Image (spheres, rainbow, N blue to C red):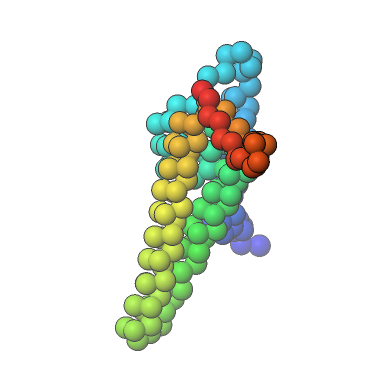
Amino acid sequence: MSGDIPSRSAPVWAAELLLILLLAGQAMAQVPADSMQPPAPRKALVRSLLLPGWGQYTNGRPFKALGFGVAAVVLAGRVVAQQRSLNRADSRGAPDLELEDLAAGRNTRVLLLVANATLAGIDAYVDAQLAGFDVSLGPRAGPGAVLLEVRLSR
C-alpha cells in the first residue's frame, strides 16, 4: 500500500464546494421573516460573478442557482479535461495543428465559463432590482373583445 489518497476530479471538488457554500448560506440565512430586507442588487451581482448561482440563491431563486452552478461546474470540468488533453498531446510531441485545435477548444470552454458567470451576474442583478414588483398578467373581458392586462406595482 503506497499511502496515496485517491484524488477526485475537478468537477467533483467544484460540486462539493458549491454544495457546502449553498448549505452554509442556508444556515446563515435563518432570520425572522419580519427582518428580511429586499436583496441588494450590487451584492447579488458580485456574488454571482464570483460563484455563479450564489446571487440567485440569495435572491430566493434556488432552481436558477442550481442551473447556473451546475453549468459552472460542468464547464470548469471541461476546461480542466481539455487542458489535460493539451498537456498530454504536447508531451508526446503532437503536431502544431493538433495543439492549436486543443488550445482553441480549451479557450472556447473558458469563454463559455466566463459567459455563464456574466449571465448569472446580470440575472441576479436584474432579479434583485425587480424583487419588490408585483406583476399581474392575465386576460380581461372587454366590450366585444378579450384584452390582455399587465399590471406592475411596487
Residue farthest to the bottom?
Answer: 95
Q: In the picture provided, is 83 more to the left or to the right than 3?
A: left
Which residue is drawn at the image coordinates 66% and 62% (left, top)?
A: 1
Total marks drawn? 0
Please report the residue visible at 65 percent of the width from the left and 41 percent of the height from the top.
144
Residue 30 point in image, percent of width and height: 63, 21
Residue 35 versus residue 16: which sits nearer the camera? 35
User: Quick one: 74 or 91, which is closer to the camera?
Assistant: 74
| Depicted 22 relative to depicted 66: above or below | above
User: Looking at the image, is 49 positioned above or below residue 33?
Assistant: below
Task: Please tell me in which quadrant of the rendered image residue 17 appears.
Answer: top right
Residue 122: percent from left, percent from top = 43, 43
Tell me where residue 95 appears, x and y as whole percent: 35, 86
Q: From what the image shows, is residue 19 above or below residue 129?
A: below
Which residue is outermost to the front? 144
Q: Residue at x 40, y 54 (%)?
A: 114
x, y (%) of residue 98? 38, 82
Residue 17 seen: no
The quadrant where residue 9 appears: bottom right
| Viewer can see residue 121 | yes
**Where is 135 relative to 9, above or below?**
above
Choose between 123 and 58: the one closer to the eye: 123
The residue sitting at the left extreme is: 96
Residue drawn at point x = 57 percent, y = 14 percent? 35
